[in-house]
């Protein structure tokens, strides 16, 4: 059974939904995904009379910056989103993202749901007339929060964020 749950770094789906542009702006495959992280800064204090111990309480949570590299998509949705965000009247155009890690049988094992994503960098690869796909060398996003779900039912749940939930994934 452990072989069925083996996860690989190159076996994941990325979906992004942006209200006002597309219900499913992006369904892409990327070779690299980095920046799925959360960190918490604890609040530490000393209780009166107990000078040898500290008390730690949960503090504010901060999130990483998602970097996706060497991706292929079927359309120009990510480029349209970035172009819309740089327009003065669309500066608040946020997306909801899902990154799904698949096992060897292409079943969802872990889902990262990213709320209120904002693209901060997009880069095209070197252009080559022989390549037929729409490639993205690098895309960087910041996000307001992240939820993590485990198991095969994880990808069926919508992203909780502002606007409409992201569409559920199919792994066929």
Image (tube, helix red, strand yellow):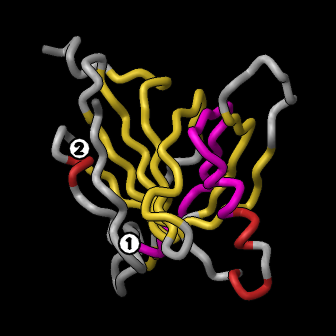
User: Dot 1 lies on which element?
Assistant: loop
- Left or right side of 142 for 44: left
Query: Looking at the rendering, in which quadrant would you find the C terminus?
Result: top left
Instruction: Check the image and name the residue furthest to the left.
Output: 1
Say if 70 sits above or below 96 in the image: above
Which residues lie in the magenta part? 58-81
Residue 41 visible in rendering? no
Q: Position of 39 compared to 128: left or right? A: left
**Which of marks 1 and 2 precedes in the sequence?**
1
Of the pair 45 and 130, the residue shown nearer to us: 130
Mark on residue 38? none
Q: Horizontal and vertical percent for residue 92? A: 63, 82
For disc 1, the marked residue is 58
* Quadrant of the frame with the N terminus: top left
In the image, which is nearer the foreground, mark 2 or mark 1? 2
Q: Crowding at label 1, few (<14), some or many (≥20) Cα neighbours within 10 Å?
A: few
Q: Is residue 162 above or below residue 23?
A: below
Identified at 39% across, 57% down, the residue is 113
Q: Which mark is residue 150?
A: 2
The reply to whether the magenta stretch includes residue 63 is yes
Q: Secondary structure at mark 2?
A: strand
| Pointer 2 local density, CA inside 10 Å: few below 14, some 14–19, many at least 20 | some
Residue at left offset 49%, top offset 24%: 10
Q: Position of residue 106 (x, y in %)?
A: 29, 24
């Amino acid at each position: 059974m452990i072989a069925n749950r083996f996860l690989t770094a190159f076996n994941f789906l990325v979906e992004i939904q942006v209200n006002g542009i597309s219900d499913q702006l992006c369904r892409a495959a990327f070779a690299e995904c980095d920046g799925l992280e959360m960190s918490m800064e604890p609040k530490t204090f000393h209780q009166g009379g107990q000078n040898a111990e500290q008390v730690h309480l949960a503090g504010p949570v901060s999130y990483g910056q998602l970097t996706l590299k060497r991706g292929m998509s079927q359309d120009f949705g990510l480029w349209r989103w970035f172009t819309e965000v740089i327009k003065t009247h669309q500066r608040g155009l946020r997306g909801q993202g899902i990154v799904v890690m698949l096992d060897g049988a292409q079943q969802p094992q872990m889902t990262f749901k990213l709320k209120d994503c904002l693209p901060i960098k997009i880069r095209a690869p070197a252009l080559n007339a022989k390549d037929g796909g729409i490639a993205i060398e690098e895309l960087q996003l910041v996000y307001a929060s992240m939820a993590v779900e485990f198991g095969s039912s994880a990808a069926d749940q919508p992203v909780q964020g502002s606007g409409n939930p992201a569409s559920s994934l199919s792994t066929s």
